[in-house]
Image: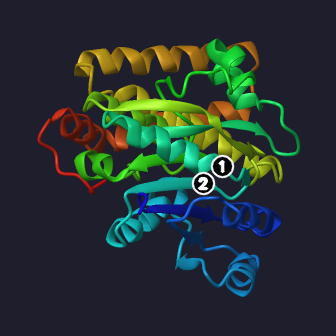
Amino acid sequence: MPPSVYVIILSYNGTRWLEACLASVMATEYPNLEVILVDNASTDDCVELVRKRYPQVTVIVNNYNYGYSEGNNVGIISAICGGADYVVLLNQDTKVTPQWLNEIISVGESNEKIGILGSVQLNYNDNDLNSWTMSAMNAALDELRDPVRARRWIPVKWVEGSCFVIKRQVLERIGLLDPIYFAFYEEIDFCRRAAYHGYRVVLVPRSRIHHFRGGSWRENRKIERDRNYRCDRSQFIYSLTDPRKSLTGNLLSYLVTLGSKSKDLLLDFDRERAYDLLSIQVDVLANSRKLFGKWRRERSPMRKGLTA
């Protein structure tokens, strides 16, 4: 029997996306697959849609919008308790191709040092490489455009959380996604933690998915402002908690980040953005003890797994 794979789809008001996402996942040509939908307290009818049309999907409904990290952690714990060898975090605004998972698992099983894997992302409605692939994987675009001739896997620093595949042993070693990140940078943080403990992070050129990108963050100006706030906040947290660096090194990274964002603000001043940037600094200061604890905990080679 091939390794047990649990696909976790975190939903939030996902009626627009889930029919296409789940239809593609159910058409996956992999024989040992379970699917869990974790809903972050949606206010639309996406949960009812899934229960009615896809009764084979396990549905977990959170009573609050816990964000990406904590919401997915609910599904991860359920998957591990169910015996998962691999956990896949898949965005609701994606569609997968039939062989995407076979390619991922084949690569994962070929090398025990590989701990985290990701698929190549295409545009949602066509087969061109999407904006994340074009920017984050710029050095490998020639290979990604010709997957037949590409390497089986390409070492990278991180893969995006829209399709984020984790081996069980990595979760047992380094723990869950850190809920200090409500949204953004949580997968980059997790990849950094995994690499610090000796695991490789790879992109699999022959595994392909379609991703809309930013599907639930494009509704209106208020939601876009919230997105920018959360992204900036997460970037500051990330810059302060690198386990490979000393406290001084992390402080310098934080100051560089602050300087860069302050410069951008001066060049194109926006009162709301200025207020949000100041609010983030207050938030970071208020959580300084928690951030220090995160840095110290993740530097320890003896840390417990399956804890945030």
Q: Is residue 140 above or below residue 161?
A: above
Q: Position of residue 140 (x, y in %)?
A: 63, 16
Among the two numbered marks 2 and 1 on one chain, the one whose residue lies closer to the N terminus:
2
Residue at left offset 58%, top offset 59%? 30
Say which residue label 1 marks: 99
Q: Residues within 10 Å of mark 1 (few under 14, many from 20)?
A: some
Amino acid type assigned to the residue bearing label 2 in the image: Leu
Nearer to me, 34 or 45: 34
Q: Which color mode does the image show?
A: rainbow
Q: Secondary structure at mark 1?
A: loop
For the question of whether residue 189 can be seen, the reply is yes
Q: Please tell me whether mark 2 or mark 1 is closer to you in this view.
A: 1
Q: Which mark is residue 90?
A: 2
- The quadrant in which the N terminus is found is bottom left
| Left or right placement of residue 299 versus residue 49 in this view | left
Q: Residues within 10 Å of mark 2 (few under 14, many from 20)?
A: many
Residue at left offset 67%, top offset 18%? 143
